[in-house]
Amino acid sequence: AKEAGKGKYMVFTPAFQQAFYERVQLEKYLRQAVQNGELLLHYQPQVDLNSERISGFEALVRWNSPELGFVSPLNFIKVAEDSRLIIPIGAWVLKEACRFGKRLQDEGYGDFLIGVNISVIQLLQNDFADHVQEVLRETGLKPQYLELEITESTIMESFDEMVVSLNMLRDLGISIALDDFGTGYSSLGYLKQMPITTLKIDKSFIEQVPDEGDSRSLARAIVLIGRKMGLKVVAEGVETQRQLQYIKRSRCDVIQGYLISKPVPEQDALALAGSNLRL
Ligand code: C2E
Ligand code: CA
Ligand code: CA
Ligand code: CA
């Protein structure tokens, strides 16, 4: 047999073939999804612990495929990134979310911060800041109501370019959140160099609060770091009253999670925005 690595013969196991086939299919359907309007956004409220009111919504993409049924973003964002389909998908998500933010204002619900997840692929496009500015102009949403969320682990891949891009966005007056914070192992030195406004503590740290000592002190340490750096700190994945009580004492600024609401369709998000929330 030929030596491995020469690339002459590749061994396709049935399982690999199957996975490969599924991936090709997924990409094919995803390609049509934007054009055919199969994507939609759900919105999850964020509650400010000071005012105890909803202060923002995170937009989360949903895909209802006629061929595949509901597909989780956990199962298609990676494919979208690898195929660069994330560019048109991300553009659609951004515009749709900004339109929603403006709608909340126009219909008298109030001013809410709109969180939009952004992939590194988008961020590293040369004209990304121009693109965002154009979307804000088209939708009429002011930059102070937009917060772009970037996953911590991906930021380190091309750190210098990323900082340039983030600085342009900050100059526009847009907020930048470091998402899934605590899972990406970025050093505090790097953190200081990042032009960010917000830390989102990953839900894995919140999950075991307040039962488990380690994640409890980690969650608290992250809040302290964030506050020390003058950042807004958001706890995501808050599911129980006990977690809420603990997080309140840790002096986190904002919470998000099933305890308040799951991500919901636009119509339900409007109802939440108009409701008088009690924590
Ligand atoms: P993420 O940005 O960390 O979003 C939070 C995820 O946690 C969402 O999953 C949300 O539904 C879920 N979640 C919220 N509250 C709770 C809770 O209390 N408990 C638990 N267990 N989970 C909670 P979702 O919607 O499935 O999204 C998964 C990931 O897909 C997101 O993680 C984000 O990284 C990515 N994603 C979603 N929409 C977009 C998008 O428009 N663009 C990009 N680039 N990525 C997206
Ligand atoms: Ca996010
Ligand atoms: Ca997150
Ligand atoms: Ca995540």
Image (tube, helix red, strand yellow):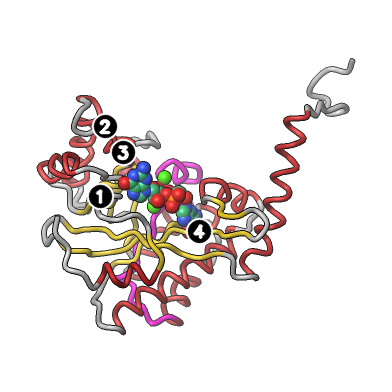
Of residues 80 and 75, the one nearer the viewer is: 75
Q: Marks 4 and 1: CB-CB under 8 Å?
A: no
The residue that mark 3 highlights is 189
Q: SS at mark 4?
A: strand
The residue that mark 4 highlights is 62
Judged by depth in the image, the label closer to the viewer, 2 or 3, is 2
The residue that mark 1 highlights is 259
Which numbered tag is attached to residue 208?
A: 2
Of residues 75 and 194, the one nearer the viewer is: 75
Of residues 192 and 221, the one nearer the viewer is: 221
Comes first in the chain, label 2 or label 1: 2
Q: Could you tell me the amino acid type at mark 2?
A: Gln
Residue at 58% in and 58% down: 86
Tell me the quarter of the picture where residue 5 sits.
Answer: top right
Q: Residues within 10 Å of mark 2 (few under 14, many from 20)?
A: some
Q: Residues within 10 Å of mark 3 (few under 14, many from 20)?
A: few
Residue at 81% in and 26% down: 11
Q: What is the distance, in whole Å, between disc 2 and disc 3 at their CAs?
A: 28 Å
Q: Is 158 part of what is drawn in magenta?
A: yes
The spot of residue 197 in percent (x, y) is 28, 56
Q: Could you tell me the amino acid type at mark 4?
A: Arg
Of residues 250 and 120, the one nearer the viewer is: 250
Q: Is mark 2 within 8 Å of ligand 1?
A: no
Q: Is residue 53 left or right of residue 203?
A: left
Q: Could you tell me the amino acid type at mark 3?
A: Gly
